[in-house]
Amino acid sequence: MERILIVEDDQPIAELERDYLELSGYAVEMATDGKAGLELGLTGQYDLILLDVMLPELSGLEVCEQLRAKMDQPILMVSAKKEDIDKIRALGLGADDYISKPFSPSELVARVKAHLSRFKRLTHIEAGEKNQAHFISAHHIRLDTLAHKVFVLDQEVIFTTKEFDLLKFFIEHPNQVFSKDDLFELIWGMEALSDTSTVVVHVRRLREKIEFDSNKPRLIETVWGTGYRFNGE
């Protein structure tokens, strides 16, 4: 049974989230402040963490940043703040998604299921393939799809699950233009469940890690008015 950690100081909201997730077959534990949530999250016992932004002791953003430095499991931020800058900051610190309050319990469960399913697919290694190296390459970038590692100029660079997934997609579809809506649906797998600022932030983070000059990108090109294209030449 997959385990989920809820870090939320509003007891009624935490209990509502817990009840719906348990009805969907998940084991759920709760923490009511950022410090306790960080300590529990760092144990590595959870498959997904549902993290409120406004928390006592440590803010959700601080907790997210420290967790992401140590783990790859999905982190979903929850907040009553709806401004784009708050979403961009959370995603920039490593969150996989941002859910604005109020939200429907069915939307919450749908997002949790989608993120868990995608993370499981990305990290699953089939029996008998563990000793085989699977690489895809482009320019000065090499991806080990089984070990889930990225090498830039032969140096390993740490990528989050979503960053890896997006880079792999770009490399496998060179010279094709994809809109932000297309990329969100293809990579996150949830049509219309969030906004495309998620894609913008992740593209920016990819450029910072793989481009020689992220301010003048040559690999992930912006096609103005349309979307993005990975230069396969």
Image: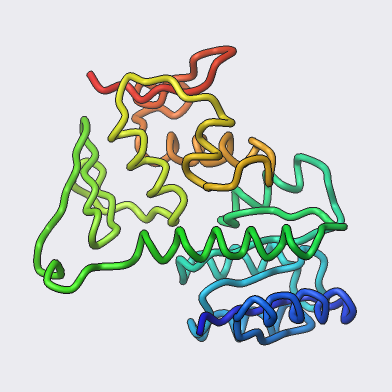
Looking at the picture, does residue 133 appear above or below residue 40? above
Looking at the picture, does residue 97 appear above or below residue 213? below
Q: Nearer the viewer, residue 189 or 221?
A: 189
Q: Quadrant of the C terminus?
A: top left
Percent coordinates x, y for residue 53 in the rendering: 77, 63
Residue at x 60% of width, y 48% of height: 92
Percent coordinates x, y for residue 49 in the rendering: 61, 72
Count up the numbered dots: 0
- Residue 142 occupies which quadrant of the picture? top left
By what rule are the colours in the image chosen? rainbow
Say whether residue 122 is left or right of residue 26: left
Residue at x 36% of width, y 31% of height: 211
Looking at the picture, does residue 61 appear above or below residue 15? above
Q: Furthest residue to the top?
A: 224
Say whether residue 47 is left or right of residue 221: right
- Residue 25 occupies which quadrant of the picture? bottom right
Looking at the picture, does residue 122 appear above or below residue 87? below
Residue at x 52% of width, y 31% of height: 182
Percent coordinates x, y for residue 80 in the rendering: 86, 56
Percent coordinates x, y for residue 86 in the rendering: 76, 48
Q: Nearer the viewer, residue 167 or 20?
A: 20
